[in-house]
């Protein structure tokens, strides 16, 4: 079983990158890989909850919620969260805020890093 890190470094306006990352994550979980999902840089904006009541999310963003339900560990770079104003409120997913050292460890311990 491989340890895989999905690195989301682009926001929702980066074409289909986030959707492709979601598909890769779900496939990794289907084969019982150890999956860690790291939101970094502009990618932390994928964690922004909807502003309106109700879901209001595109289908692929709702799919992000399935990752931790199937065993993925979720983390987000704490500096990126602060930069995007997401360090004090609720997020779409319950993510561990990772300092630079923890972020480096996540990446160093991975067998495979897939960036989206």
Image (tube, rainbow, N blue to C red):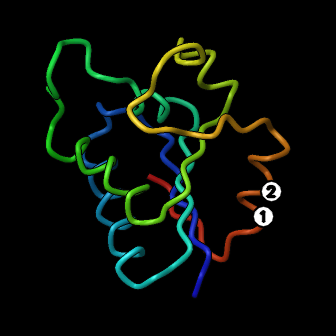
- According to the picture, the residue beneath numbered tag 2 turns out to be 105
Circle 2 residues within 10 Å: few <14, some 14–19, many ≥20: few
Position of 27 relative to 70 (above/below):
below
* Left or right relative to 106: residue 114: left
The relative height of residue 85 versus residue 93 in the rendered view (above or below) is above
Residue beneath the point at 41% across and 75% down: 28
Q: Residue at x 53, y 11 (%)?
A: 85
* Residue at 36% from the left image edge and 67% from the top image edge: 24
- Name the spot of residue 60 as percent of width and height, x first: 21, 47
Residue extending furthest toward the right: 101
Q: Which numbered marker is on residue 60?
A: none
Badge 1 marks a residue whose secondary structure is helix
Residue at 49 percent across and 61 percent down: it is 72
Q: Is residue 41 above or below residue 51?
A: below
Measured as percent of width and height from the top left, residue 69 is found at: 38, 58
Is the C-beta separation of discs 1 and 2 under 8 Å?
yes
Residue 62 coordinates in the image, percent (x, y): 23, 43
Where residue 116 appears, as percent x and y from the top left, is 43, 52
Q: Secondary structure at mark 2?
A: helix
**Residue on which disc 1 sits:** 108
Which quadrant would residue 106 be assigned to in this image? bottom right
| CA distance separating discs 1 and 2 | 5 Å
């Amino acid at each position: 079983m491989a340890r895989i890190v999905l690195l989301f470094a682009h926001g929702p306006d980066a074409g289909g990158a986030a959707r492709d990352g979601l598909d890769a994550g779900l496939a990794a979980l289907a084969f019982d890989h150890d999956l860690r999902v790291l939101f970094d840089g502009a990618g932390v904006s994928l964690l922004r909850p909807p502003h309106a009541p109700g879901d209001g999310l595109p289908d692929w963003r709702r799919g992000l919620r399935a990752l931790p339900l199937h065993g993925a560990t979720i983390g987000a770079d704490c500096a990126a969260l602060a930069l995007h104003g997401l360090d004090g409120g609720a997020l779409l997913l319950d993510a561990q805020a990772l300092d630079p050292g923890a972020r480096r460890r996540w990446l160093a311990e991975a067998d495979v890093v897939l960036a989206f």
